[in-house]
Every structure is written in C-alpha cells, then in structure tokens.
C-alpha cells in the first residue's frame, strides 16, 4: 500500500517556496507558514476559548483492515497517513488527540483547501446579517470582472464550485504565481490575485450553474467579493465574525499575495484544536453558549441543499467512487445516514462533522502527495470505525 508514511530523509536544505509542499520540507513548512509567506493575522478573544472538557478514550477496540490480512490500530492509521495533528470530539468533549512531526496542541498548521469551508461559513454569516447577497452576480461586488471569464457568474456559483471556469495551462501558471505560493521564474511578471482576475479571458468556457467543477480560483475571488461587500479586510472579518465569537484558543492567520489579498482558497493556518472547534460549532447548530455565530439555517442548507445531480455529473464523483455526495458552500456532504459533512485540503487536511451523533474529527497532515487516494480512503474508513467505537455499535 503506497501511503504517506513512506520514510523520507532529513532536510538537507532549508524549506523554501520551491519545495515547501514536499516531504521532508513540508513537515516543518506546514507549521511555520509565516516564516515562508506574508500573512494577515486573524485574532482570537484571548482567555475565552470554547471549552473542550477532556475525557480521554484509548480506542483499544479500533481495528481497521489494512488490505494485507492484518488490522491497524488508530495510531497506526494516523502514522500511515503522515498525521501531524489529530483531534476527536464527542459531545463537545476532547476524547482523543495525537501529534507528530513537531506539531503540538498549540502549533498553527496550514489547512490548505479546507479553508474553503471556513470561508463558506463567513459568507453565511454575512448573508444572514444582510451584508452579502449570495444570489447576486459576482460583478455586482467586483465590477472589474464583468467582462472576464466570470461574466454572469453569481456568488452562489463560487460557493458551490459551479462557475463554468476552465483554466488552460498558461492561466494555471499565472494563477499559481498570483497566489504568491510559487516564485516567478525568469521572464514571468509577478502579479497579484486581483490583476489575475481582471485579465482572465475565457478558455474553453462552460455555462455557469452546470456540474460541480473544482476551480480553486473561485474561492479566492469569493474573498475579494467578501471584502468589497463589507469594506473590510477578510482577516479582520474572520476574526470578528467567527474566530472570536467561536472561542478559538489561539490566533490564526491566512497567507496573502504581493498586494495583501488573502489566499481564501487554501491559506488558513490554525491549531488542530481550533480546527476541531469549527466542527463543534457546526455540530452545535452554529451557536456557542446561546450566542448565534453561524445561522443554523445556513448549516442546514449545507447539509440538505447541495445539488446531488451536479455532483454526480462531475469528475469528482468517480474520484470518490461515485458516492452519494454533494457540495455546498465549501463543504462536502456524504448523504448516507448518518450524514457527514467534511472539509478537505491537499496533503491530508480534513475536518469531519457528524451532526446527528455529535462527532467531530480534525486531521492535519504532511502527506507528500497532494492527493493520496489510498490515504484518503483509509481515513474515510477510519471515520466509520471511530464512530462505531464511540457509539458502541
């Protein structure tokens, strides 16, 4: 089984923007993002964290078939999938946590594309207070894109990955440089995200509102929409609308481009426990201690209103084995019972929320491959086994 636990030699050179997403460099880089990139800080309300009472469980009954005739313990699964931080919450209690590769309970770690799910919650908060119309055209907030490939797309299309954007190889490279995650090579002109969007022409454009089509740029554009709709920087909004009222224990941060635009599609960095607190907020219908943070209707909308046909028509359906799934406002939804919502990022970042059984599982990793299909399948099976252990089934 080719999983992410393959041994890698120690770093022979420092981590840099040229190597930071491959092991062994990623094991340091993913928890030291602010040493590699400019970031915007997302403050917390110090001294008032969401309580996670400890009730440690051993998970001795956990057994998962390895595919070789033997079984794996929970810790073996975590080590086999290059886990840096892992937290299980049950009924709001911290029942299990695991750390490796220099990560601790207090170490911020990049969550990659799981950032999209957090952005989706912030969009929901803004929609709930009337500051963001998710049915409005993107150009209503960002007129600079009115004549680009995003012409006619709505904010909802961005949230649900149903904008008909197709980026060719040249545009993908331009986008990579614009995000500030990759250094420009000789002859390339460094640009920022806003400039990229302003000059994005259609390349094999498809109709907006069609099948689910995963384009990371959509959520970066959504970040620009949010800033325009409110007149505030995204990091400030994230702090005031989510991070502080949710009760994050530690401040977070998000990477920014050369001009300070946030990498909303993947640049969020948070501790494993605070990542789990986002899931716990979802499990508590968006409230904390009687204070509404995320509208419960928005969470219900994520859970129940994703377009299953749009998912089935996408390439991702085959990637996930054609499962009974949907995607809504940055969240993947497994529509089998019990329904499971999850956030997902490359290199093994995951947040699973089983609202019915009040189970939250946060996993931060440094897998070498951006997408390790075997590791992904293993952790999804592990979620089911964790549920069985917790519920005594």
Image: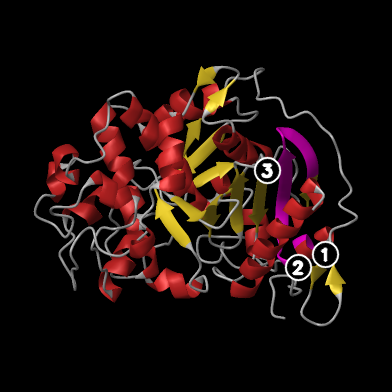
Give the vertical position of 44 relative to 349 (above or below): above
Where disc 2 sits, the SS reads helix
Q: Are marks 1 and 2 in contact (CB under 8 Å)?
A: yes
- Residue occupying the far left of the picture: 147
SS assignment for the magenta stretch, majority? strand
- Is disc 1 surrounded by few (<14), some (14 to 19) or many (20+) residues within 10 Å? some
The image position of residue 368, as x and y in percent, is 62, 69
What label sits on residue 80 in the rendered view? 2
The span picked out in magenta is 78-96
* Label 3: element kind: strand
Q: Secondary structure at mark 1?
A: helix
Within 10 angstroms of label 2, few (less than 14), some, or many (20 or more) residues? many
Query: Magenta span has 92?
Result: yes
Q: Residue at x 55, y 70 (%)?
A: 371
The residue under label 3 is 359
The residues bearing labels 3 and 2 have C-alpha atoms spaced at a distance of 23 Å
In this rendering, is residue 294 above or below 159? above
Q: Is residue 287 magenta?
A: no
């Amino acid at each position: 089984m080719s999983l992410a636990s393959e041994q890698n030699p120690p770093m022979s050179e420092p981590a840099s923007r040229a190597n930071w997403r491959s092991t062994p460099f990623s094991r340091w880089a993913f928890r030291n993002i602010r040493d590699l990139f400019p970031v915007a800080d997302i403050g917390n309300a110090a001294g008032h964290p969401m309580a996670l009472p400890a009730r440690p469980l051993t998970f001795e009954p956990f057994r998962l078939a390895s595919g070789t005739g033997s079984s794996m313990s929970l810790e073996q699964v975590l080590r086999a999938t290059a886990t840096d931080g892992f937290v299980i919450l049950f009924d709001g209690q911290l029942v299990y946590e695991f750390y490796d590769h220099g990560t601790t309970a207090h170490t911020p770690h990049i969550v990659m594309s799981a950032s999209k799910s957090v952005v989706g919650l912030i969009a929901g908060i803004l929609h709930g207070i009337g500051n963001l119309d998710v049915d409005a055209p993107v150009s209503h907030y960002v007129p600079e894109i009115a004549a680009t490939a995003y012409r006619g797309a709505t904010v909802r299309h961005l949230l649900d990955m149903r904008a008909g954007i197709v980026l060719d190889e040249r545009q993908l490279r331009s986008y990579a440089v614009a995000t500030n995650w990759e250094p420009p090579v000789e002859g390339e002109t460094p640009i920022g995200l806003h400039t990229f969007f302003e000059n994005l022409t259609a390349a094999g454009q498809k109709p907006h509102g069609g099948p689910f089509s995963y384009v990371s740029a959509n959520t970066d554009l959504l970040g620009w929409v949010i800033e325009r709709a409110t007149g505030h920087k995204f990091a400030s909004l994230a702090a005031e609308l989510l991070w502080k009222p949710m009760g994050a224990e530690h401040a977070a941060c998000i990477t920014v481009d050369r001009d300070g635009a946030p990498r909303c599609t993947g640049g969020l960095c948070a501790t494993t426990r605070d990542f789990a607190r986002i899931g716990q907020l979802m499990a508590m219908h968006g409230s904390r201690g009687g204070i509404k943070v995320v509208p419960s209707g928005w969470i219900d909308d994520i859970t129940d209103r994703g377009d299953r046909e749009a998912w089935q028509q996408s390439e991702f359906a085959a990637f996930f084995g054609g499962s009974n799934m949907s995607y809504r406002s940055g969240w993947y939804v497994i529509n089998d019972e019990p329904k499971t919502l999850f956030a997902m990022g490359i290199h093994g970042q995951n947040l699973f929320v089983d609202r019915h059984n009040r189970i939250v599982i946060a996993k931060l990793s440094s897998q070498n491959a951006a997408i390790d299909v075997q590791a992904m399948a293993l952790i999804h099976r592990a979620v089911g086994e964790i549920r069985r252990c917790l519920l005594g089934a």
